[in-house]
Image (cartoon, rainbow, N blue to C red):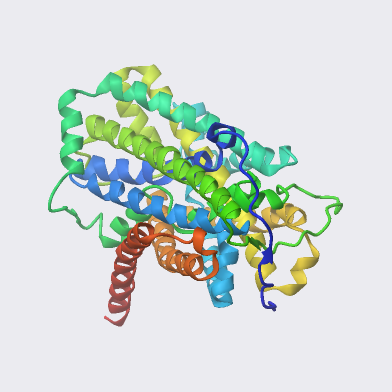
């Protein structure tokens, strides 16, 4: 079992050298992680059903997630440790609970399934050479080439972060440019006005029905932006990029031959003197720019571009909109307005968005599994993080693959995968965020601690998600008793 985590070591805060643009990367990966779920799938689906009346909700969710990410980043740049390590310092009980949740989420590979289905429709728009009901038309089979592509990116570069960063940034660029072209081609000034009305609706309106209950609304809030476990990934990318105290740690490298020397994963605290405080403030300015202007602004833009296109082309959409051919339906209807090139443009955008999400999720998931296993099981520490990458991929992939096969044969839809996964992640987030805020206030040097504004908005966001989580759990308990 686990031993107590060693106390943080003492060390000066490294000096920041270079401009913001020389260190771009972590925030962009977080955009790529976010764009394939809430932006591409959930909120366009909601918009197609109900219009733009609930456009305020994802904007509010992204606003709070910016503050959450800032607190995650604060711990990372001040100590060099992952946010998961910070949570473990507060209580090892959280780690065992998170391992349980992560096993469940491993069995719900919604992004892989939707990416596979979209790839199949892109390559074989007329249905292919197989007969209806053939194994060649199943989503689980088409996850195989998607998995190979993800593994090639992760394992193709010795330094995993470098391959992920380059790939995701290209995907995000494709998404933004492509969706701007779509919006300009199909939208009108009146449509933009309706989007504005939905954003500034007061009092806020939540439209529920039998096909969109509270569980699904809560799930959509979590995946508007980047919520749940995914929010923890930011600390890994800051460390690999060498941001703040992350400069004291090596970048994660794949080590299949066992040549890597075990590194001490214990973080650092700086002495609270004027020089270290000044250096921290410089890194904090970078963090604010990365989160507010790169992650926050880009996420909102892509989110509203997808919602805008969905509203113009699809609203009002009847029931039954939610199978694995979701992106194909969107592209087909869009093609009736823009022509064949519009259909294939949207399919390419969809694959770019989904692939960036599954790539970042796989990378972040491997890092998180490694982190938690090292904390929870003392015997695992004889292997370095780099040595655990391939074994974790080989162990977790079959779980997701066979679960996908089983659930697809039972008629579980892609949206079911997303909404269940998002609900679990929402509960996780109500644990992670206040814990990290507590650790930042208690452990960090005074000059690195969050100020009143950050504390206020982080607590407000936590209460926002906690209220939904409590209601969700209570509703399910009542249903079980009944």
The residue furthest left is: 203
Q: Residue furthest front?
A: 274
Q: Nearer the viewer, residue 181 or 289?
A: 289
**Which residue: 57% across, 66% down?**
86
Look at the image and tell me whether residue 108 can be seen: no
Q: Residue at x 55, y 77 (%)?
A: 93
> Which residue is at the front of the view, 143 or 265?
265
Up/down of 373 relative to 412, above or below: below
Residue 383 spot, x, y in % from top left = 79, 62
Residue 352 in sight in this render? yes
Vertical order, 25 against 394 (above or below) = above
Q: Residue furthest bottom?
A: 481
Res. 53 image quadrant: top left
Q: Is 15 situated left or right of 347 in this image?
A: right
The C terminus appears in which quarter of the rendering? Answer: bottom left
User: Which corner quadrant holds the N terminus?
Assistant: bottom right
- The percent coordinates of residue 48 (x first, y second) are 25, 40
Q: 391 or 296: which is nearer to us?
A: 296
Q: Position of residue 225 (x, y in %)?
A: 39, 47
Which picture quadrant has residue 81?
A: bottom right
Residue drawn at 39 percent across, 40 percent down? 299
């Amino acid at each position: 079992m686990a031993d107590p985590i060693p106390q943080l070591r003492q060390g000066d805060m490294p000096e920041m050298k270079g401009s913001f643009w020389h260190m771009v990367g972590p925030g962009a990966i977080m955009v790529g992680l976010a764009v394939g779920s809430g932006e591409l799938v959930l909120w366009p689906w909601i918009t197609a059903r109900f219009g733009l009346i609930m456009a305020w909700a994802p904007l509010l969710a992204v606003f709070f997630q910016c503050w959450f990410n800032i607190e995650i980043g604060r711990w990372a740049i001040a100590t060099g440790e992952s946010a998961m390590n910070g949570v473990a310092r507060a209580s090892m009980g959280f780690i065992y609970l998170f391992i349980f949740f992560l096993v469940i989420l491993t069995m719900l590979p919604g992004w892989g399934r939707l990416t596979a289905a979209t790839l199949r429709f892109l390559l074989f728009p007329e249905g292919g050479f197989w007969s209806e009901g053939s194994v060649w038309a199943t989503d689980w089979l088409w996850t195989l080439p998607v998995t190979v592509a993800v593994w090639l990116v992760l394992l193709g570069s010795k330094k995993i972060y470098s391959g992920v960063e380059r790939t995701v940034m290209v995907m995000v660029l494709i998404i933004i440019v492509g969706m701007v072209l779509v919006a300009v081609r199909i939208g009108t000034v009146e449509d933009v006005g309706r989007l504005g009305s939905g954003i500034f609706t007061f009092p806020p309106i939540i439209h529920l029905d039998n096909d969109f209950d509270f569980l699904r609304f809560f799930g959509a809030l979590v995946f508007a932006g980047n919520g749940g476990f995914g929010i923890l990934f930011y600390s890994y990318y800051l460390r690999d990029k060498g941001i703040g105290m992350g400069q004291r740690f090596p970048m994660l490298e794949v080590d299949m031959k066992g040549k890597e020397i075990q590194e001490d994963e214990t973080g650092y605290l700086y002495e609270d003197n004027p020089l270290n405080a000044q250096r921290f403030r410089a890194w904090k300015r970078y963090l604010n720019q990365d989160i507010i202007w790169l992650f926050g602004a880009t996420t909102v833009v892509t989110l509203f571009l997808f919602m805008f296109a969905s509203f113009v082309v699809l609203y009002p959409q009847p029931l039954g909109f939610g199978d694995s051919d979701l992106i194909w339906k969107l592209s087909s209807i869009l093609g009736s307005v823009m022509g064949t090139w519009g259909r294939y443009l949207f399919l390419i955008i969809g694959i770019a968005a989904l692939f960036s999400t599954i790539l970042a999720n796989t990378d972040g998931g491997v890092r998180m599994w490694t982190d938690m296993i090292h904390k929870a099981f003392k015997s695992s520490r004889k292997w370095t993080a780099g040595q655990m990458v391939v074994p974790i991929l080989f162990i977790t992939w079959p779980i997701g693959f066979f679960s996908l096969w089983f659930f697809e044969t039972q008629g579980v839809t892609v949206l079911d995968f997303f909404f269940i996964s998002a609900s679990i992640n929402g509960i996780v987030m109500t644990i992670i965020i206040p814990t990290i805020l507590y650790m930042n206030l208690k452990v960090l040097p005074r000059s690195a601690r969050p100020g009143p504004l950050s504390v206020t908005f982080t607590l407000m966001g936590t209460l926002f998600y906690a209220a939904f989580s409590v209601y969700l759990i209570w509703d399910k308990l009542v249903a079980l008793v009944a």
